[in-house]
Image: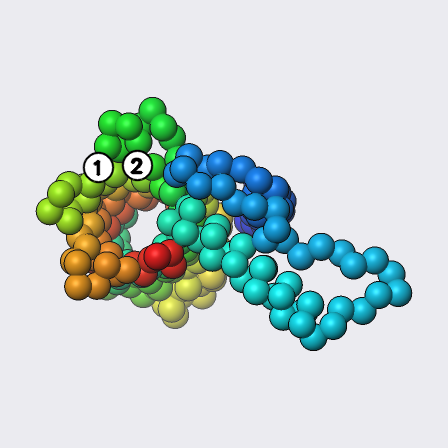
Amino acid sequence: MNVNKRAYHFIVFLVSVGLFSFSTVHSLVGSDFDCGYGNTISSSAIIKYQGPGRENTDSEKADQGAKSHGGIKTFLNKYRVRAGLLPGMSFPVGELGGLIKVGFAGNIFSDLAVPISFLNSRGLYVRSGLSIGYAPFGSAVSEYEAKISLLPILAYAELAYPLQVGIKPFVRFGTGGTFSSLKDKSENPGASDESSFDYTLALGAGASYQHRAIPRVEFLMNLGYMILYEEVNGNFINISIGACYHLYR
């Protein structure tokens, strides 16, 4: 399957996930429910349609805006939403190990807590989220000058076990796809650029740390292993150190 078809299918997949997530969040905010943390989100958080021929007054608009904002805050607090940045280094191994150089890698991510009472009662906590990364590499072969860029987009799940000292070991599993591009900078007559979209698996383990002085900031260290299939068959070891910000209180 060529890159255009694969990219098209992947975009359709992301749009479907986005629409499903939007409808799910809308239903969660728009009706009473218990997400497992002991509190309930009320349907009063949603702005109701006023009907034709009736305009809202300034006070009603302000009240509705406050309710909507309160609903978002409640959702962030309920699901402990966080967002962060993980810069680091990526080491190609296997077939690509001798062909491309070690490269800088970084990704942005956001995730939320998934309440699972069976695990929560045993001190284990699950998070689920999305990460978008970027990693450029140069050729390690002097006779072939090229630049390779990877853009992985992965959905992941994280299982963590918080310790009393503020350290939280975790393991991660992610899956998704990577947009790969190769720019041929050589002067060969047949030189050409190539691109592909490759199915990707990612495994990782690490730990995070929170200090009481800055409780909404969480520092992370992660060791990951990423595998690309199909057009680009390559394995990468990623070492990242970064931080995330808690959007909840």
Give 87 or 111, whichever is nearer the viewer.
111
Residue bearing mark 1: 161
Alpha-carbon neighbours of circle 2 within 10 Å: few (<14), some, or many (≥20)? many
- Residue plotted at (16% across, 58% down): 211
Give 51 or 133, whichever is nearer the viewer.
51
How has the structure been colored for display?
rainbow
Residue type of the residue flagged with mark 2 = Tyr
How far is mark 1 from mark 2, CA to CA?
A: 6 Å
Quadrant of image for the C terminus: bottom left
Quadrant of image for the N terminus: top right
Q: Secondary structure at mark 1?
A: loop
- Residue plotted at (88% across, 65% down): 53
- Residue plotted at (32% across, 39% down): 158
- In the picture, the disc for residue 91 is none
Q: Earlier in the sequence, mark 1 or mark 2?
A: 2
Q: Count the marks: how many?
A: 2
Q: Quadrant of residue 203?
A: top left
Instruction: Check contact, mark 1 vs mark 2: CB within 8 A.
Output: yes
Give coordinates of residue 59: x percent, y percent. 67, 72
Give coordinates of residue 2: x percent, y percent. 57, 45
Residue bearing mark 2: 125
Residue type of the residue flagged with mark 1 = Tyr
- Regarding residue 71, the answer to whether it shows in the image is yes
- Regarding residue 21, the answer to whether it shows in the image is no
- Residue plotted at (36% across, 28% down): 117
Give coordinates of residue 52: x percent, y percent. 87, 61
